[in-house]
Image (tube, rainbow, N blue to C red):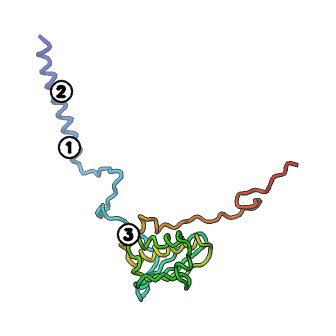
């Protein structure tokens, strides 16, 4: 006998084995077992829906939106209502209270980003800290009040980073140190 006559039989046997293996794999896939899918979580909602943004502030019965902003030791209470663009801080004009152009641009940034500059009256009461802390507090307060007034502005405000609270504070002084980390001068003799 030649090798060619034995090969067709062996090929037939190997094809039968291969077909049974394929059939068993197919039958295992058809069993109703939950497939493990890492990275996607679907509880029946649509996968495209985003989480509802956390809104900090409120709107009173007169339609005035209120937001609170904090930075360092400064606290700003902001009220926003429809109007002609008047901005009052602690009873004074905006440019009088913050004479530096840098501070003025920072405070107007969320209004420009949302396209509401000149359409809203803003009343702010701010206390504590210095000018930089008060500027950051007013900025956050305005952004939160804008978000309360119109939740659709959340995307623009969060993209610009206006809803992020800057948590940096002055580090406290520790016992046995001259300042927060500065030690007393060491004397060798």
Is 43 positioned to the left or the right of 74 in the image?
left
Q: Is residue 116 visible?
A: yes
Tell me what residue is drawn at x 12 percent, y 21 percent: 8
Image depth: mark 3 or mark 1 in front: 3
What secondary structure is found at the residue carrying circle 3? Answer: loop
Image depth: mark 3 or mark 2 in front: 3
Tell me what residue is drawn at x 47 percent, y 81 percent: 66
Q: Residue furthest right?
A: 189
Q: Quadrant of residue 14?
A: top left
Residue 39 spot, x, y in % from top left: 36, 52
Tell me what residue is drawn at x 46 percent, y 65 percent: 161
Residue 85 spot, x, y in % from top left: 43, 81
Residue under label 1: 27
Is 16 positioned to the left or the right of 93 in the image?
left
- Give 187 or 2, whichever is nearer the viewer: 187
Disc 3 to disc 2, C-alpha distance: 59 Å
């Amino acid at each position: 006998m030649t090798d060619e006559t034995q090969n067709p039989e062996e090929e037939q046997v190997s094809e039968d084995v291969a077909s049974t293996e394929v059939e068993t794999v197919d039958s295992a896939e058809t069993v109703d077992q939950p497939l493990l899918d890492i990275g996607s979580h679907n509880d029946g909602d649509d996968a495209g829906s985003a989480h509802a943004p956390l809104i900090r502030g409120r709107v009173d019965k007169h339609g005035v939106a209120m937001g609170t902003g904090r930075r360092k030791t400064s606290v700003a209470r902001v009220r926003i209502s429809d109007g002609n663009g008047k901005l009052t801080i602690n009873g004074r004009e905006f440019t009088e209270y913050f004479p530096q152009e840098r501070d003025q641009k920072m405070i107007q940034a969320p209004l420009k980003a949302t396209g509401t500059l000149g359409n809203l009256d803003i009343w702010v009461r701010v206390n504590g800290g210095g000018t930089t802390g008060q500027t950051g507090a007013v900025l956050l307060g305005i952004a939160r009040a804008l978000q309360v007034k119109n939740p659709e502005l959340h995307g623009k405000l969060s993209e610009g980073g206006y809803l992020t609270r800057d948590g940096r504070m002055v580090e406290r002084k520790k016992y046995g140190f001259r300042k927060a980390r500065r030690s007393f001068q060491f004397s060798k003799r």
